[in-house]
Image (tube, rainbow, N blue to C red):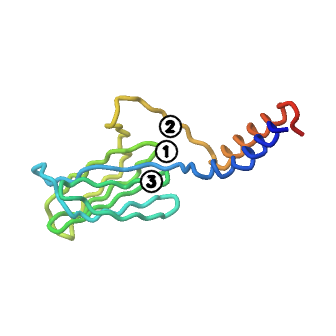
């Protein structure tokens, strides 16, 4: 009987545990000028191309920026700073549980000029030497349902569980 109660409590808590896991990614990089010096206070605008989700940030005094815990998917990044041409990178993908590095080389220019890059960025993992492969699924909801089905099947196979 005690085993049954323990399984019942685990079954009731499972959906809440699954809800805590969010498929997110991070984007980091450094903004530099043509000489390679860091550019602080650059306004950054990250846009998820599928949903229109927008995030804003600014580069730090060392030129570094970080967008953390953003949903995975295809993105566009815009950067602007006084005395530099606007920068835009489109068509890159942020992958689940991965930190992508995208360095931004600003070009000296006026507001009327812009630098636009529309090629897919290389997925570089600079934090480790590990190789990774991305598996895409139709829906994370399907994954959650599959886990719950497996969890439910485990209970039905247990002795004394009705």
Marks 2 and 1 close (CB-CB < 8 Å): yes
Q: Residue at x 36, y 47 (%)?
A: 119
Residue on which disc 1 sits: 96
Q: Position of residue 53 (x, y in %)?
A: 47, 63
Q: In this orientation, which residue lies closer to the viewer: 113 or 78?
A: 78
CA distance separating discs 2 and 1? 8 Å
Horizontal side of 35 relative to 68 (left or right) equals left
Q: Residue at x 57, y 48 (%)?
A: 21
Q: Residue at x 40, y 53 (%)?
A: 68
Say which element carries label 3: strand
Q: In this orientation, which residue lies closer to the viewer: 110 or 24?
A: 24
The answer to which image quadrant residue 131 occupies is: top left
Residue on which disc 3 sits: 69
Marks 2 and 3 close (CB-CB < 8 Å): no
CA distance separating discs 3 and 1? 10 Å
Horizontal side of 36 relative to 140 (left or right) equals left
Q: Specify which label sits upstream in the sequence, 2 or 3.
A: 3
Residue on which disc 2 sits: 134
Horizontal side of 117 relative to 47 (left or right) equals left
| Residue 99 position (above or below residue 80) | above
CA distance separating discs 2 and 3? 18 Å
Q: Residue at x 52, y 61 (%)?
A: 51
């Amino acid at each position: 009987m005690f085993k049954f109660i323990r399984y019942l409590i685990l079954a009731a808590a499972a959906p809440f545990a699954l809800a805590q896991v969010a498929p997110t990614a991070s984007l980091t990089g450094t903004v530099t000028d043509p000489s390679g010096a860091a550019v602080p206070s650059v306004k950054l605008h990250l846009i998820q191309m599928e949903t229109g989700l927008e995030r804003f940030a600014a580069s730090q005094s060392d030129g570094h920026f970080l967008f953390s815990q953003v949903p995975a998917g295809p993105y566009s990044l815009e950067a602007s700073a006084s005395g530099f041409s606007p920068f835009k990178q489109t068509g890159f993908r942020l992958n689940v549980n991965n930190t992508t590095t995208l360095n931004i080389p600003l070009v000296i220019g006026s507001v009327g000029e812009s630098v636009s890059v529309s090629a897919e960025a290389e997925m570089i993992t600079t934090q480790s030497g590990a190789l990774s492969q991305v598996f895409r699924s139709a829906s994370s909801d399907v994954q959650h349902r599959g886990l719950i089905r497996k969890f439910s099947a485990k209970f039905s196979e247990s002795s004394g569980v009705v």
